[in-house]
Amino acid sequence: MAVPKGYAGNAAIIDLTQQKAQVVPIDKFWKEYDIDPRLWLGGDGFITKILWKDFPKAIDPLGPENEIIVAPGPWTGTAAPQAGRAMLGCISPETGGFSSGSFGWYFPTILKYAGYDILIIRGKASSPVYVFIDDQEITFRDAAHLWGKETGETVKTIRGELGERYEGEIRVLSTSIAGEHLVKYAVACGDATSCPGRSGGGTVMGSKNLKAVAVRGTGEIPIHDPIGLLEASYKAVKWFLAEEPTVKLWKEHGATTDLSVVANWPLQGDPLVENRKAADFPHLNNAGCLNCHAPCYHWLQIKEGKYAGLRQLGGHMTFLTTGLRNLGIDDFNDWIYYERLMQELALDPASFSMAFSFAVDLFVKGIITTDDTDGLTLRRGDAELIWDVARRVAHRDGKLGNLLADGVSEMAKKLGKEAEAIMPQTVKGKPSIQRDAKLQALMWSFGALTSNRGGDWLRLHNTWELAFLPENRDTYPKYIGKTFAHEYCTKKR
């Protein structure tokens, strides 16, 4: 079949063991994998087909046979609104099964401009390397000097050494210290900003001695009707900005808008969350992924304390909920630093916070002692203690660092039945992200229980924007009642 418009036209297959790269025309690649783009489109669709064909039986996720797959979609890099993202997939080190995560910022679009709809990385390098994709030229470069660097310094160093003429055009997908030390829930991170969380991609990169992938793309994406796409996109954005009730809040406060939801429907017995609102957050200005008109990213700045002046592009609710409910962090400045630290170390905040919270419970019940924690007294709410533990986990430093680095399921398995009895809820071996069930009704819980990557809602979102606005406190229960929610979920408190 002819290649539909919107696709860049190629798949890049990289063999780290042989340090060879193959550029395959996308229609030939589709034929090999029996992919009909009209059905599978791109992103998760392509990743699912590739993993299903390549791994009919279980494999060692940390073995060289595992693959890292990056797949944008046909709209990525076009004028279509909200279409600046890609999926990263692999066999998960945390679950042993399918895993993928979404990320944005600029790497997905520049990968398309370089000419690729799919990037597959296989094998294992004999020593640390990074891959540089410069349009149709793919080279392998030594990364020994990058090993041990955090994400921000990695991006800065790669851009600097590739030359000034490239510096503003280079986008970097990298792992950090947690990935290098094979923490089971390490993430990859795009430009030290947007990370495909919960995918374990950073761990797989570390297992392959792959520090980063840098890309520069100068090509164009073929469009069947460019003027028609622009007109349709303009109409969609115009409606979106005028009619969608949550957009104004997101433009003002980013993903911290979710705090307004929690304030409207506070989790019973959760004083850390009640009466919080997005307007209290120290926002500077918003910033979105390419072509995003309702950015969840915002520039935040720590106003006081040890890290005063530090700026962080973020504010995602995952950091807020895990920081509040799992770690007991109730200071806005500490939240900001928590997000920065997780990104720099390439730790998944949900899995780390659940592992830490589980360790605190184990410590309180005497299942583990200071002999197991390298002398630390574990407790929630102590930010500096939590930062210390996070660094130990990223480096697999000591007994405690190694224990938490494998995640809650492995922790419980190692410690025995007493630990298993109080282990947090997991799906496919991955701990579930804690959200308020009253907001999402049964659909949220059902999504978490059936998620193909385990432990969270993945891409399942029922309509919940009604809950964002105080005036909808009366209409929202009527809506979630239609989803067969229990009376408890609709009762105001």
Image (spheres, rainbow, N blue to C red):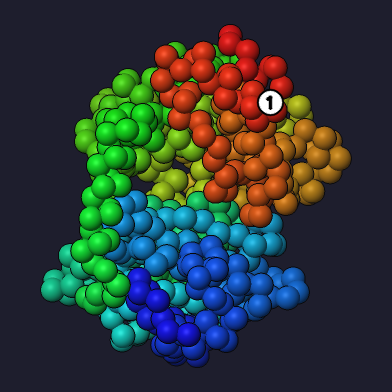
**Residue 129: x and y, percent?**
41, 77
Along the line of sight, the residue nearer the viewer: 269 or 12: 12
- Residue at far top of view: 493
The answer to which of 472 and 147 lies nearer the viewer is 472
- Quarter the C terminus occupies: top right
| Residue farthest right in this picture | 417
Using the image, determine if residue 411 lies above or below residue 131: above
Name the image quarter holding residue 311: top left
Quarter of the image for residue 421 reads: top right
Q: Identify the residue at horizontal 23%, vertical 67% (top origin).
A: 226
Amino acid type assigned to the residue bearing label 1 in the image: Ala
Q: Secondary structure at mark 1?
A: loop
Q: Quadrant of residue 300?
A: top left
Indicate the position of residue 191 as horizontal and vertical percent values. Answer: 32, 58
Residue found 27% across the figure and 53% down from its top: 233
Residue 398 in sight in this render: no
Label 1 belongs to which residue? Answer: 485
Horizontal side, residue 411 vs residue 382: left or right: right
* 169 to the left or right of 115: left
Q: Is residue 122 visible?
A: yes
